[in-house]
Amino acid sequence: MSPVAAENARTETATTESTAAESTATARPAPVITSRGAGLGVLLALLATVVWSGSFVATRDLADSVPPVQAVFWRWIIALLAVAPFAARPLWRQRALIRRHLGHVTLASLFGVTLYNTLVHQAGLTTSAGNMGMIMAASPVIMAGYARLGGERLGVRRVLGTLIAVLGVLLLVGEGSPTLAPGAGDLWMFAAALSFATYSALLKRRPAELDGLAFLLATFVLGTLMLAPAYAVSLAVQGGFPVTAGTVGPLLYVGVCSSAVAFFCWNRAVSLIGAARAGVVYYLQPVCVALLAALLLGERLGAVGVGCMVLILGGVAMSSAR
């Protein structure tokens, strides 16, 4: 064999081996979620749901003394201060990656930070905390719709469980009748539910190489920056709010617990079990809100409320079971 022919043969062999290696890497199956990982994901989604349930009570308390945009702005300032000590270093290390995926991170910031909480606080002006929690249970339906549009098969059991949970929510909102006649505040909450579901769908498509804490802090920073102009307008038109225990306490809760802790838990849960299954756990929110209202405000659930909770819990168990 001539030197040229030998060189050509070596080149063809190297090319074949490189192609085979690339094919193997491309065909490598995605990591399988273990039972332990799925269980942790459900627990984290449940923790976020419980914490967010308490935030509706705090949000309703703030509505009478703090303008919505100002409440949301300071909520995220507090969240930034709480998360920065843990996430600043990962964010700096992945700053080039953040710039590369800036469009995706900005959209997640817009729907999850800027819009969602502003809509929730706006709704708190004209509707009750109970209604806010119950209407937010519409989010998992939208999440499941996004998952189906993305090609995910929901399965008969998950669809049936979702329908049962939806029926429980409708009966709870309609006080025993499966009807819904929303007021202005309720419509704001439906918009918040759509925004949160969109944020959760974006989480599902977060670049795998992007660190969770870095992503979290980046969305907090961008979302707060997008809120800044609206905050300045609100401050000029409506003035500030009184700094008292009645305003600082709820702001600390929604800033540290409902924003920093709950968002971290929710983001991690979505990465482990997906937005659709995490969304099913979110159906427990009206149950949690109703229980908190009974414990803190002395509201009685009644037979209809208990029956609706049974439907919601049953639907969640059916839909989230592996």
Image: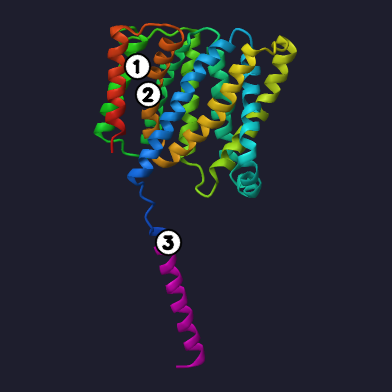
The image quadrant of residue 78 is: top right
In depth, the one of 133 and 249 nearer the eye is 249
**305 relative to 261 in the view: left or right:** left
- The disc label shown at residue 25, or none: 3
**Whether label 2 touches label 1, CB < 8 Å:** yes
The residue tagged with tag 3: helix, strand or loop? helix
The residue tagged with tag 1: helix, strand or loop? helix
Q: CA distance from mark 2 to mark 1?
A: 8 Å
- Residue 16 magenta: yes
Placement of 1 over or under 59, stated as above or below: below
Kindly identify which residue carries mark 2.
283
- Counting residues from the N terminus, which is met first, the one under dot 3 or under dot 1? 3
Residue 280 is situated, as x and y percent measured from the top left of the image, at 36, 29
Residue 311 is situated, as x and y percent measured from the top left of the image, at 28, 19
Would residue 16 be visible to someone looking at this image? yes
Placement of 62 over or under 275, stated as above or below: above
Q: Which SS type dominates the magenta stretch?
A: helix
Dot 3: few (<14), some (14–19), or many (≥20) neighbours within 10 Å? few
**139 relative to 209 in the view: left or right:** left
The magenta-colored residue range is 1-25
